[in-house]
Image (cartoon, coloured by chain):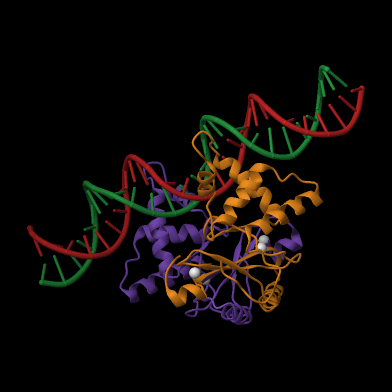
Chain colours: A purple, B orange, C red, D green
Amino acid sequence: MHRHDGHDACWTDAGDMLARAEATCRERGLQFTPLRREVLEAVAGSGKAQGAYDIAERLSAPGKRVAPVSVYRALDFLMEQGLVHRIASRNAFIPCAHEHAPGEGVIFLICRSCGAVDEASSADVEGGLGRTLERAGFTPTRSILEVEGDCGLCRGQGGAP
Amino acid sequence: MHRHDGHDACWTDAGDMLARAEATCRERGLQFTPLRREVLEAVAGSGKAQGAYDIAERLSAPGKRVAPVSVYRALDFLMEQGLVHRIASRNAFIPCAHEHAPGEGVIFLICRSCGAVDEASSADVEGGLGRTLERAGFTPTRSILEVEGDCGLCRGQGGAP
DNA sequence: GCGGGTTTGTTACAGTGTATCACCGCCAGC
DNA sequence: GCTGGCGGTGATACACTGTAACAAACCCGC
Ligand SMILES: [Zn+2]
Ligand SMILES: [Zn+2]
Ligand SMILES: [Zn+2]
Ligand SMILES: [Zn+2]
C-alpha cells in the first residue's frame, strides 16, 4: 500500500478500517451487517480499485452466491457513510483511507501500472477551484478530481507487485 | 449556451465548430467523413451532454439506422482530435468549445438543472495540483476534473430551458 | 406474538462499451 | 485495367455496469 503525506489519520490496515466502520455505524444507529462487512473487506483486501462484479465474484463461493445487486446496495451504503469511494473513471471502488473533514475535496491518484489508488487533498487546489468557479458564476455541489499516472514506487521499479 | 470568462477563442456556433473540425482534419491528413460530421453535429446540436446511444438514435431515421458502435468509433476519432470531450461522471460527450493549449487541463462545469456543460481552465488550479502531485511523488499522465452544480443562469431563474 | 421498517435474495431489465468479421471505397503499384 | 492493401462502415454478438420491482427474511419496539 502506498503512503501519502500532508496529513495523518490514514488507515492502511484493513483491521483498523473495519473497526472504524463498526464504530461509525454504531454511533449513527446504523447496521454494519455481515454483507456490508464482507463487501468492505473485499474492497479493502486488494490494493487496487475493485469493480462491483469483481467483488461479487470474490464473495461468491460454491453454494453461496452473492449477486452484484447486493454488492451495489452495500457499496451505496458504505459510500453514504464515507467508508468507500467510487472512482468514476474506472467504474470501481476503493476503501476510504481518511477521515475527511466535512466539505473537503479529495484527489484520487490512480497508478496505471500497479492500479493502486491513493487519496490526497490540497487546500491550494480547492482554493483555486473555488475562485475559478466563482468567477464563472457557478455554484458547485459535488466535484470529482481523478489523476491517472505513475506512483512513486512504480516509476522507480516499473511494474505491478 | 452558456459563456464563461477568462479566455476567448470559444465556439458557441455549430457552424464554426464544423469549419474548425474540417480544417483540423485536413491539416492532419485525416478524413472528416459524413458520419463523423453527423456525429459532431449531433453532439454540438443540443446544449447538453449527449450519450452515445442518444446520438445513435438521433442520427437514425426510418430506413437508415446508425448503430451505437459506429457512433463510438466516430466519437473515439473526434476525441483523439480534441474535438469532443467525454464526461466521465455522466457517460456522455460534449463538443470542445476551445482550442486547448497542449497539456492544458480542463475543468468541466456541469449544470445539474439545465444539463449544460461549460469548460474552464485555471493556471491556479493546475499549479496547485502539480505541486500536490509532486509532493506525493506521483507523475500524472491524464487528469479529469468535473464539477457538478448550478450554473449562473439556472441559479437565477431556476429550471431547464 | 405482532406490526412496521430495514436488509437481502432473486429475477429481469436498461444502459454503456467492445470484439469480431464482412463489406465497401479508395488509392498505390503492377 | 487489375489487384492488393488500408481505413472506414455495417452488422451481430457479447461483456460489463447499474437499476427496478417484488418477495422473503430479519430486527426491534410494542
Ligand atoms: Zn477518503
Ligand atoms: Zn503504482
Ligand atoms: Zn475543450
Ligand atoms: Zn444551468
The residue at the point 49 percent across, 36 percent down is B62
Which residue is drawn at the image coordinates 45% and 70% (left, top)? A82
Question: Would you say A64 lies left or right of B3 here?
Answer: left
Q: Left or right? Give the position of B140 relative to B93.
A: right
- The quadrant where residue A38 appears: bottom left
Residue C22, how many percent across, how many down?
A: 64, 24
- Residue B115 x, y percent position in the rendering: 49, 63
Q: Is residue B119 above or below residue B24?
A: below
Can the viewer see residue B79?
yes
| D28 sits left or right of D19 in the view | left
Residue located 36% across and 71% down the image: A25
Rendered location of residue B103, percent (x, y): 74, 65
Compared across the picture, whether A129 is left or right of A65 comes to right
The reply to whether residue A161 is visible in this rendering is: no
Residue B22 vs residue A80, the one in the foreground: B22
Residue D25 coordinates in the image, percent (x, y) = 23, 52
Q: Quadrant holding ligand 3?
A: bottom right
Within the image, what quadrant is residue A5 found in? bottom right
A140 lies above or below C11: below
Choose between B64 and D7: the one closer to the eye.
Answer: B64
Q: The N terminus of chain A is located in which quarter?
A: bottom right
Count of numbered marks: 0
